[in-house]
Amino acid sequence: MSDFTYDLIIVGGGIPGLTLACGLRGAGLRVAAIEAQSEQAVDDRPRAYALSPLSARIFRTIGIWEQIAPDITHFPQVVLSDADYPYRVVFTPADLGEAAVYYCAEHRVLQGALRHQAATDPHITCYYDTQVQAVSYGPHQATVTVETGRGQQDLSAALVVAADGINSRVRQQAGIKTDGWAYWQSCITAFVSPAQSHQNIAHERFWPDGPFAILPLPDNRCQIVWVVPHREAEALIALPPDQFMAAMQTRYGDRSGSLTLLSQPLVFPARLMHSRRYCQPRLALLGDAAHHCHPVGGQGLNLGIRDAATLAQVLSTAAQQQQDLGDIRVLRRYSRRRRVENWVMLLFTDILNRTFSNRWLPMMVLRRGVLRLMIAWSPLRRLMLHVMTGLWGYYLPEPLRSIKRSPSQNSVTTQNSFFSP
């Protein structure tokens, strides 16, 4: 058997891909994760994410929660409001029966913890600075041709998982079509620090041109997620820093005093995308390679984490039953469990954005009536929060709970290329 033969090859070493790899720890499967960027580059993305309680449960199960807990915030409240309308919906942990409504973590914190966890398992090998050139699918295995700084190498596995993002080359080379559209909006993200304490309270305020979210972080920092039409986003990014911050302050409000900009603002277009299928023989799609939604509500990464947990369950069960991991009958179990829930969440974010991002008077009256109803009637508020957090859908997979961790799993298998000693 070749040194480059695995049970599973994950193309993409980001958070969803490594969540899958870590979710399979103890299952006895040989896993390779291939990342085109360096370890430092993939760690240093200036982003933060709102994590649902279900994502937190998954991270507890795979063993990284205690490691990341000191560096994340627990939201005691999430406040939903419509522009300058005085009525606000306040979600609290009591609405979910959880320790927090949501959590927030920076990309570097999650990525670093997952990378460390993968490196301590002798069955997981992570390759960085490695480009996938082609994937071929045979009746019994798939072959992945990769390029490193020292040449080409072929890897083989029963299954390839594409976790390489919205523009997935693996998905495109496999001929899997997608449906969706580009929105009229772009998303601006930046880290800021308010003069006064943010009290760990998150805000999602809807304006006619797009939502504005405040995600509190440790050390009295926040990530801002500011959605506006494309031309306005371009104009805002082109402003001098003091004028950009003045414009942001009008959206943020004066609840916490003046703001200090901590990072270079980034901008990217808002899109919705859904793959027409999540699998075919020897291939499964994961995270943004399978679906991508509007940034409203912070659903994107949470969906990818739940994809990874579900696929880990399906593959663990198949391995225990000595089934072929790349068999389409195995992979369809994953597709059936995730495709409907993801479709519902993509639709939910689309409706939410279109309902609030307009000035049409009948719609304004309707949505503000719904807000007041959510304030007055707790069952509707709890239902909305359960949908937003994923607690209405597929629950945390059982095999992830039952996997036994070996105390001897402490060898580091991270490599920079296939020809490292």
Image: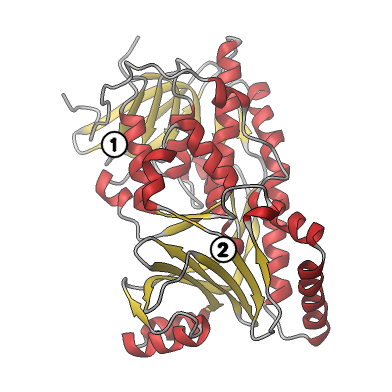
Q: Position of residue 168 (x, y in %)?
A: 48, 47
Q: Residue at x 48, y 85 (%)?
A: 254
Q: Image check: 140 left or right of 388?
A: left
Give the number of the disc on residue 295: 2
* Marks 2/1: CA–CA distance: 33 Å
> In the image, is 182 to the left or to the right of 199?
right
Label 1: element kind: strand
Left/right placement of residue 293 relative to residue 104 reads: right
The disc labelled 1 sits on which kind of residue? Glu
In depth, the one of 373 and 241 nearer the eye is 373
How many badges with numbers are in the image? 2
Q: In this view of the protein, can residue 290 be seen by the observer?
A: no
Q: Residue at coordinates 69% horizontally, 56% vertically from top-left?
A: 385
In this rendering, which labeled residue sits more in front, label 2 or label 1? 2
Neighbor class of circle 1 (other Cα within 10 Å; few <14, some 14-19, many 20+) is some
Any part of residue 413 in sight: yes
138 left or right of 31 in image: right
Q: Secondary structure at mark 2?
A: loop
Residue at x-position 55% and y-position 15%: 319
Label 2: few (<14), some (14–19) or many (≥20) C-alpha neighbours in 10 Å: many
- The quarter of the rendered structure image containing the N terminus is top left
Which of the two residues, 34 or 25, is positioned nearer the viewer here? 25
Q: Residue at x 69, y 42 (%)?
A: 339
Kindly identify the amino acid type of the residue bearing the numbered disc 2: Pro
> Which residue is under mark 1?
147
Q: Quadrant of residue 86?
A: bottom right
Residue 244 pos. (x, y %): 39, 85
Which of marks 1 and 2 precedes in the sequence?
A: 1
| Percent of width and height locating residue 139 | 56, 18
Vertical order, 305 against 143 (above or below): below
